[in-house]
Amino acid sequence: MAVNKDSVTAVAAKSARAAGAPLVSLVLGGARSGKSAVAEGQVLRTGLEPVYLATAESRDEEMARRIAQHRARRGQGWTTIEEPLELIDTLIAQARPGRAILVDCLTLWLSNLMAAERDPVAEGDRLAVALADVGGPVVLVSNEVGQGIVPDNALARRFRDEAGLIHLKVAAVAGRVLFVTAGLAQTLKDVR
């Protein structure tokens, strides 16, 4: 029996909304603001199988500690998939009814794209298209980097600008956008 992809997507959207969550959420905040914990809570409240799609790479001791802290906080109930570069293809393959995916985080993914000399504008466009037709709830975490001083070097300015553009694209398709400060989430957008 053939499965109608449109009806499966509609059912996933309906069940996610019935659980009080839009199909796509974006959680922004500064470093160590508590945004990952807020996003994890959103995923767990869906009652669906939680999947953690990690974009970080453990390239030094500090990052290894941060990754270990995130894993310890999440506990055993999560399926973790590490994908530093091919986020969109992995997201498409993993998002489906019965699962809620947490992507942590978009700014690390952007760093990886830039280091691989990939086009962040094109990848941001691809991400927005994928999110508009995703098969289950997705919560994306990202660092807000555009509220500080203008960076003093061209690479940092480009990173800030590219992050802002990706945030604009994801926020446009997201039903919920939160900004987290000191562990407290402020709702910027909530369309149900």
Image (cartoon, rainbow, N blue to C red):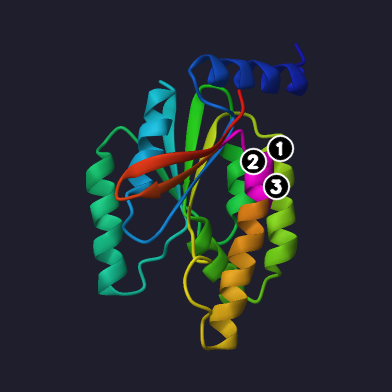
Q: Residue at x 74, y 23 (%)?
A: 5
Give the residue type that dot 1 points to: Ala
Spatial CA span between label 2 and label 3: 12 Å
Residue 102 x/y as whole percent: 46, 41
Q: Nearer the viewer, residue 18 or 190?
A: 190
Mark with earlier residue (2, 3): 2
Q: Residue at x 73, y 16 (%)?
A: 7
Label at residue 128: 3
Label at residue 92: 2
* Count of number-bearing discs: 3
Which residues are the magenta region? 169-176
24 up-or-down from 140: above or below: above
Label at residue 109: none
89 up-or-down from 190: above or below: below
- Judge the density around disc 2: few (<14), some (14-19), many (≥20) Cα neighbours within 10 Å: some
Label at residue 132: 1
Spatial CA span between label 1 and label 2: 11 Å
Q: Are marks 1 and 3 in contact (CB under 8 Å)?
A: yes
Q: Are marks 1 and 2 in contact (CB under 8 Å)?
A: no
Residue 108 x/y as whole percent: 48, 63
87 up-or-down from 62: above or below: above
Q: On the image, which quarter does residue 17 sit in?
A: top right
Give the residue type that dot 3 points to: Ala
Does residue 95 appear anywhere in the picture?
Answer: no
Main secondary structure of the magenta stretch: helix
- Judge the density around disc 1: few (<14), some (14-19), many (≥20) Cα neighbours within 10 Å: some
Report the mark closest to the observer, 1 or 2: 1
Answer left or right for 173 relative to 48: right
- Does the magenta run of residues contain 174? yes
